[in-house]
């Protein structure tokens, strides 16, 4: 009986050690599962964060593309305006350089749509076009009336010349 009791005690001890070892393994497994769940949650949060950043970057990219397109259109418009401005004849012809101390500078725009028929039919097309659009002349005179008189003396109405504008010249 003592042998049985001794065998029972050995069995109980072995069972206790087995249970302790099983409980230790179970706790270790629980810690490993908890760590894996924490890693999974952290990875999930990193993926969500990356998705939010990616979505934000995607929106920024779309907006940047829209701005780029708008800027390209604005550049094309500005280039077209520059080409148009460059096409305008900016030359100023000097009617005469005689002047007194009291004379003021006047910019007078003179046009003649019928220059070829009334003045010079042999003039080249580019020059005829400048007369149609109007040429600007710097005229030195005391006042606007005198400036008009000087221009009309050189470019008379009966030859088709017309004064389109007279403005003070900022010298």
Image (cartoon, rainbow, N blue to C red):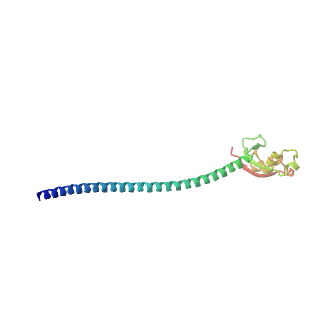
| Residue 15 image offset from top left, x and y in percent | 21, 57
Picture quadrant where residue 124 is located = top right
| Residue 23 image offset from top left, x and y in percent | 25, 57
In depth, the one of 71 and 34 nearer the eye is 34
Residue reaching furthest to the left: 2
In depth, the one of 144 and 84 nearer the eye is 84
Residue reaching furthest to the top: 97
In depth, the one of 82 and 53 nearer the eye is 53
| Residue 141 image offset from top left, x and y in percent | 75, 45
In depth, the one of 86 and 8 nearer the eye is 8
| Residue 29 image offset from top left, x and y in percent | 31, 55
Q: Would residue 97 be found to the left or right of residue 74 on screen? A: right
Taking the spot 80% from the left edge, 50% from the top edge, the residue there is 132
Picture layout, residue 36 above or below residue 120: below
Taking the spot 46% from the left edge, 54% from the top edge, the residue there is 50
* Number of numbered labels in the structure image: 0
Taking the spot 70% from the left edge, 48% from the top edge, the residue there is 83
- The N terminus is located in which quarter? bottom left
Q: Would residue 149 be found to the left or right of residue 39 on screen? A: right
Q: Would residue 41 be found to the left or right of residue 141 on screen? A: left
- The C terminus is located in which quarter? top right
Q: Would residue 106 be found to the left or right of residue 18 on screen? A: right
């Amino acid at each position: 009986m003592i042998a049985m009791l001794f065998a029972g005690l050995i069995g109980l001890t072995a069972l206790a050690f087995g249970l302790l070892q099983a409980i230790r393994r179970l706790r270790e497994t629980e810690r490993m599962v908890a760590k894996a769940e924490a890693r999974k949650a952290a990875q999930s949060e990193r993926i969500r964060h990356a998705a939010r950043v990616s979505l934000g970057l995607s929106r920024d990219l779309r907006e940047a593309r829209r701005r780029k397109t708008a800027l390209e259109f604005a550049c094309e418009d500005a280039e077209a305006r520059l080409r148009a401005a460059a096409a305008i004849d900016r030359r100023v012809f000097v009617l005469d350089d005689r002047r007194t101390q009291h004379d003021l500078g006047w910019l007078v725009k003179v046009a003649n749509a019928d220059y070829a028929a009334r003045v010079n039919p042999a003039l080249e097309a580019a020059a005829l076009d400048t007369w149609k659009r109007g040429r600007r002349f710097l005229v030195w005179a005391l006042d606007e009336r005198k400036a008009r008189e000087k221009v009309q003396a050189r470019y008379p109405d009966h030859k088709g010349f017309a004064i389109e504008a007279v403005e003070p010249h900022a010298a």
